[in-house]
Image (cartoon, helix red, strand yellow):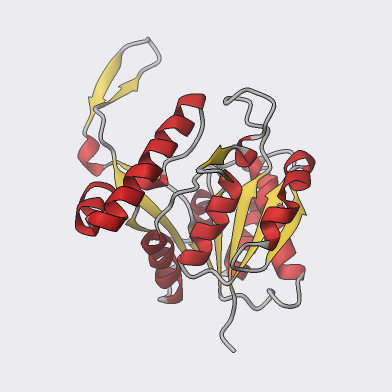
Amino acid sequence: MASPVVAVVVGAGLGLRYGGNTPKPALKVTGRTLIVMAIEAMAAGGCTNAVVVVNDQVAKQLGPELAALPIPVKQVSGGASRQESVYNGLKAVRDDAQLADAAVVLVHDAVRPMVPAKVVSAVIQAVQGGAEAVAPAIPVADSMRLIDADGGSAVIDRSALRAVQTPQGFPLRLILEAHEKMAASGAQFTDDVSCAEQAGHTVTLVEGSRLSMKVTEPGDLTVAQALWEVRDVFGHHSGRRLRRHFGA
């Protein structure tokens, strides 16, 4: 039997930047919550199981929806930070007898609900091919400037810059040990390839997608809804056009 490929989908944040009373992962696009869409995307790309890391408020809303998902899903409580929440999810994979021999684990933000299956698959394949830490990334579209200590700024050549997305993939033992090492040192990081890099591992980038946008502010939900509808139209009538514009 093939080793499981497990997605750790993180949605335990309070969504303070978004505002409102509903946690971001429980917000809906096309009538489905962001976190459910994210799990579906992981399944479409080749994940066989998912561990969702959520707070109590989201957990209460998820029950019926999780039962209808195409892969088995286990719920885990989140921590005080994203870093701690991811670590909780990874430990849940390690401690589950059916998941502990996972060859690949993907860490994905629940608020990136529309990541294309080909991006998920590319991350999995890179780890299976021997890469230590893998992230999808896209070129930076805007002009970039670096602010200095005096309040001035200088232009940065954007051609060498990439915006990093999720899911980010690793061998399970490698990313667990990296989290343990960083927790012991007190180091902080913004994503999991940075954690692996600080622990001495090499980061590999694969092609990401504009569709893998992160829902951070209220306007992002409107954009996500519009992109999803455009994707559906292009997906039915012009797949090549969709791939050209969004990398789906």
| Drawn side of residue 248 relative to residue 168, left or right | left
Nearer the observer, 129 or 76? 76
Residue toward you, 30 or 243:
30
Q: Give the residue at x 30% y 56%.
A: 235
125 up-or-down from 10: above or below? below
Q: Horizontal and vertical percent for residue 186?
A: 68, 43
- 25 left or right, relative to 44: right
Please name the residue shown 70% across and 66% down the image: 93
Q: What residue appears at the point 54 percent right and 52 percent down from the top-left corner?
A: 38
Residue 182 drawn above or below residue 131: above
Image coords of residue 16 (percent x, y): 63, 26
Picture residue at 43% right of the left edge, 38% below the top: 224
Dividing the picture into quadrants, the one containing residue 81 is: top right
Quarter in which the N terminus is drawn: bottom right
Report the side of 115 relative to 87 (left or right).
Answer: left
Q: Position of residue 122 (x, y in %)?
A: 38, 66
Answer with the quarter of the image where residue 239 lies.
bottom left
**Residue 209 visible at all:** no
Task: Please state the horizontal and vertical placement of residue 57, each as a whole percent of the image.
Answer: 77, 39
Q: Nearer the viewer, residue 127 or 42?
A: 42
Residue 155, quarter of picture: top left
